[in-house]
Image (cartoon, rainbow, N blue to C red):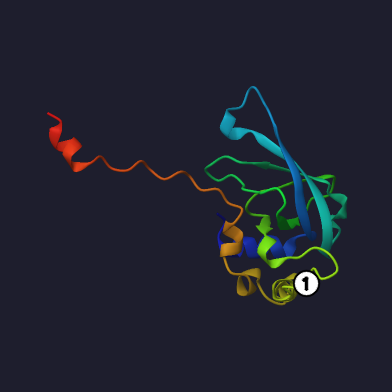
Amino acid sequence: MPAPRDWDEHFAQATHIFVFRLVSAEVQEHEALSNRLQTVIGRIRWLENLRGDGSQFGEIAFNTDPCGGTRLEIGHYFLAVTNADGYRIEGSYDNLIDITEEYREGENNHALGWFLSALGPAIAGEVLLSDVLHPRFRYNTHTSPPPPPPPPRPEAVADKP
């Protein structure tokens, strides 16, 4: 996970900051790659721009590797941050924030207006993103490695010669 200041710089310098919904996703299989390194291609529906023009993006590519991959759930809403242009955005945990709990689509999409209102000064470059956004938002799209196996039971260790 990038340090907060790295995220701050990425956010401050981004050409496009926009909201989208992931509407479908499919694994793009590669025979030469292991199962852990498969790419997922998702269809996205652009909803609104906060900076630049995110309406050009119709797809997202991401990797779901359990260690450092990206976790995106179909039907969720995301804030995307990128300098790229084109039809497909390359998604990762360092340029996507899951805002499903804070965003409502439609006429009243700012029903939980504190969230997008709080981002306003960061989008305008008046404050750092880390000054207005709790780190938990960045962690929602990050996969973590599986936990280590439990230690052996004491009686199992005592029985070994």
Kindly identify the residue that appears in the image at 59 percent across and 65 percent down: 5
Q: Decide if residue 48 is on the left or right side of residue 32.
A: right
- Image location (x, y in percent) of residue 137: 61, 63
Placement of the N terminus among the 4 image quadrants? bottom right
Kindly identify the residue that appears in the image at 82 percent across and 51 percent down: 45
Kindly identify the residue that appears in the image at 58 percent across and 30 percent down: 35
Q: Which residue is mark 1?
A: 110
Query: Can residue 49 be seen by looking at this rendering?
Result: yes
- Image location (x, y in percent) of residue 118: 70, 75
Q: Amino acid at mark 1?
A: His
Q: Decide if residue 154 is on the left or right side of residue 51.
A: left
Task: Tally the numbered discs.
Answer: 1
Q: Quadrant of residue 97?
A: bottom right
Q: Would you place residue 60 above or below residue 117 in this image?
A: above
- Image location (x, y in percent) of residue 4: 58, 64
- In this rendered view, identify the residue nearer to me: 125 or 22: 22
Placement of the C terminus among the 4 image quadrants? top left
